[in-house]
Image (spheres, coloured by chain):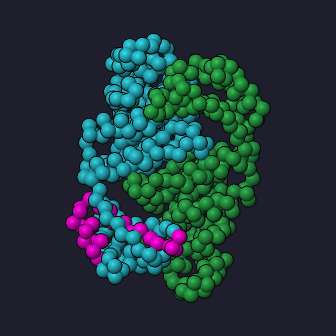
Chain colours: A cyan, B green
Amino acid sequence: MQSDNPTAAILVIGDEILSGRTREGNAHHLAQVLSATGFDLREIRVVSDDHDRIVAAVRALDGSLGGDYDLLFTSGGIGPTHDDITADAVADAHGTVLEIHPEARALLQARCDRMGVELTENRLRMARVPLGATLIQNAVSAAPGFSIGNTHVMAGVPEVFRGMVDWLIPRLSAGRPVQSQSVEVRRGESDVAEDLRAVAAEFPDLSLGSYPFQDPTGWGTNLVVRGLDAARVDQAMTVLKQRLAL
Amino acid sequence: MQSDNPTAAILVIGDEILSGRTREGNAHHLAQVLSATGFDLREIRVVSDDHDRIVAAVRALDGSLGGDYDLLFTSGGIGPTHDDITADAVADAHGTVLEIHPEARALLQARCDRMGVELTENRLRMARVPLGATLIQNAVSAAPGFSIGNTHVMAGVPEVFRGMVDWLIPRLSAGRPVQSQSVEVRRGESDVAEDLRAVAAEFPDLSLGSYPFQDPTGWGTNLVVRGLDAARVDQAMTVLKQRLAL
């Protein structure tokens, strides 16, 4: 698909995903938001709670550090426990150090006051952000995410992650939302491959995908046309349906 | 967690994941199988249907090509359509070319005969595997996966992927299955961080994780102890529960 949209990657930090304990859902949610907003998500990586792996991935993916994509979003590893090492690693990748951010401290203090608990050293860990970073607001649990360079660091808890995405995405410069149309055919992929290839060649500015599935009645295929221009997507889908006699 | 288990990565090829259309599930399934069998899954990557990206990822992840992990498993992009480019890219990464594999052709021919359809050029595409590769059987739809070097290439359709995993994994040399125990506490992560850190320091051979969650009754945290020695995992969980007065 031809697009001048900003490109993006997602980095998920979490042993619990790699061990199979938890099924990742944050990247899927953000992928939907990015498509609808006008960013081209090009890669998702999941790495373990390992300092060097996180540093290497941030450098490989954040364009402001010479990485492959314009923007990098991360999920996970910014809580108060010993295995929450994302902030340290992101600071390292950006060649800076962590500080207690005054605004983050104030947010945590206010929440502790409301709850009648003490701002302990463990809770204060969540106010540590890289020097020069700006905060990403968290309406759910007060502990903020942060942005540094083109890396946007968010929490792993799904409700908190979603709240941060809701706050952050409208504040970024987006491109054009992706338009898509799909149609389901009750045929195997092999039987539509020829027509699909022909339409893909006729519309090089669009992306045509085919996604086979199996259900109790047999095999079927979902055909999806995607692009930035709704009229072109519509044209391609019309041509495709004509070819397939749908 | 200390482990001599073979390390592994999963590479998912699929624009439909990156566009947010489909929620990835194959990597989650394989992650569970690998943990239970004795492989250490260290990384998951999702890349788009882009030749160069797939080649680069295979080289970065397959240890037999100088990549970071012992084994690489891939999912997606081996069907009959124009956007199924995984076989080409994997062959390229391994410095070889595609051929029509005689056994794969025979499998497809037999299935076409049973279904009373012709083995068209599009269907025959699914018999193209890198020179020197061995086949991964597919009981669901006949079109095989393949192994070359330490890269194991499987289908993206979930039922087919699972069938290939079932066939393949028992044929690989595994290490020791991961043992794990977990306990749920009705406290926030900050309130257990201290004890968790102390137990993690006492059991450096184990992995201790904490996973906060929110439900209608408030915040809670799941505490998970993982390791290769069931007795050590049991000891650590006992100590942790004592410290937390559970």
Q: Residue A202: within the magenta?
A: no
Q: Is residue B188 above or below residue B92?
A: above
Vertical arrangement, residue B83 with respect to residue A187, above or below: above
The image position of residue B18, as x and y in percent, is: 41, 53
Q: Is residue A230 magenta?
A: yes
At 59% from the left and 72% from the top, the residue drawn is B141
Question: Could you tell me if residue B63 is visible in this image?
Answer: no
Give percent across and percent down for residue B146.
63, 66
Q: Quadrant of residue A95?
A: top left
Give the x, y percent position of residue B133.
Answer: 65, 67
Q: How many marks?
A: 0
Q: Is residue A157 left or right of residue A242?
A: right
In percent of width and height, residue B183 lies at 62, 31
Q: Residue furthest left?
A: A231
Tell which of B123 and A183 is nearer to you. Answer: A183
Taking the view exactly as shown, the residue that stands out farthest to the right is B231
Work out which quarter of the rendered image holds the N terminus of chain A and state it. bottom left
Give the position of the C terminus of chain A as an image quadrant: bottom left
State whether residue A245 is above or below residue B233. below
Q: Tell me what residue is drawn at x 64 percent, y 59 percent.
A: B165
- Does residue B45 appear in the picture of this structure? yes
Observer-nearest of B11 and B229: B229
Q: Residue at x 42, y 13 (%)?
A: A116
Q: Splitting the image into 4 quarters, where does residue A110 fall?
A: top left
Q: From the viewer's perspective, is residue B34 above or below residue A183?
A: above
Is residue B189 toward the left or the right of residue A192 in the image? right
Please give the name of the residue rendered at 40% of the width and 27% of the height, measured from the top-left corner. A141
Residue B134 or B106: which is nearer the viewer? B106
Report the span colored magenta.
Answer: A216-239
